[in-house]
Amino acid sequence: MNEVDFIQYFSLPIRERTCSGAEAMLFCFPYAGAGVASYHAFCKDLPAHIIPFVVRLPGREASRQQAALTDFNDIVTCLTKAIQPALGKSPVFFWGHSMGALVAFEVARLLKQEQKPTCLIVSGHVAPQIPAPLKSTPVAKMNDAQFVGLLQSYGGMPQAILDNPDLLQLILPQLRADLIALEGYRYVSGTPLDNDIFCINGNTDHMVNPSNILAWREQTTGEFSSRWLPGSHFFINENRMALVEIINEVITNKLTQLDVI
């Protein structure tokens, strides 16, 4: 893959920003069903020394002309190859939320040592070695009503979308593709990362708890730390400014340690 592939899968939402003079790049790996637009406000609120890129999974948004990949390993392999032209120039940080936490983690594991992120920031997902509970009906076999019910159990889906059948039918295929991929994820044990891992989560998120978040510690020989913010699984929208402040703090502290700023 080349820089064309990078542009296809990694979007810079804040067009007036460039990497000139920036100290760090932050790659944001979205939750299932989310696209670049979902991260515009977050990216806009970041300080100027952090340049954000939002990941587009293969077959979604700008790459809709290709079939949406639903095999988790294929998605990770594709993104790992596509991201390489941007690495090795500035300190790089990954932040993944929910499904994006697993994608970011697996991309970090596939990268060569000199390309790995300085810090992996994860939110909204248990440590990867903890198996997900099995659903009574696989996502691929759910009818639309069952699938919408599953989405409602996660929260975060605006009622205006749920009440609009035409809009719902437009977004369901991407959501289903994402959740099929997530359901197919199988952790394979391997050498721990040596970059830092920072976990940040909502304190009323029913999908995580302190025990399964602390288990992320096993995935690195570097530093591990965690923080909790008020909010649910989608605290990243409910408490966005606090999230921005913490991510900025994590990145700035690491840049100071590296003597970059």
Image (tube, grey):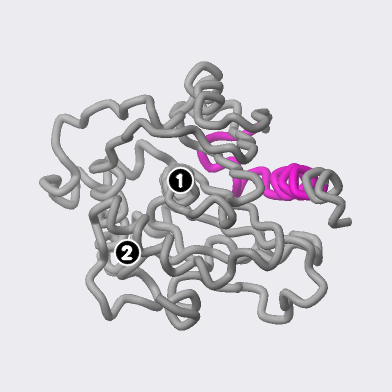
User: Which callout, 1 or 2, points to the residue nearer the camera?
Assistant: 1
Decide: few, some or many residues near mark 1? Use Cα within 10 Å; few <14, some 14-19, many ≥20.
many
Q: Give the prevailing secondary structure in the magenta stretch.
A: helix
For this rendering, which residue is in front, 238 or 138? 138
In the figure, residue 19 lies in which quadrant? bottom right
Start and end of the magenta stretch? 230-252
Examine the structure image and report whether residue 228 is included in the region drawn in magenta: no
**What type is the residue that disc 2 sits on?**
Ile
Q: Which residue is mark 2?
A: 171
Q: Which residue is mark 1?
A: 109
Q: Residue at x 59, y 44 (%)?
A: 120
Q: Is residue 243 above or below residue 216?
A: below
Image coordinates for residue 134, horizontal then vertical, percent: 22, 28
- Alpha carbon distance from label 1 to label 2: 30 Å
**Element type at mark 1:** helix
Examine the structure image and report whether residue 245 is included in the region drawn in magenta: yes
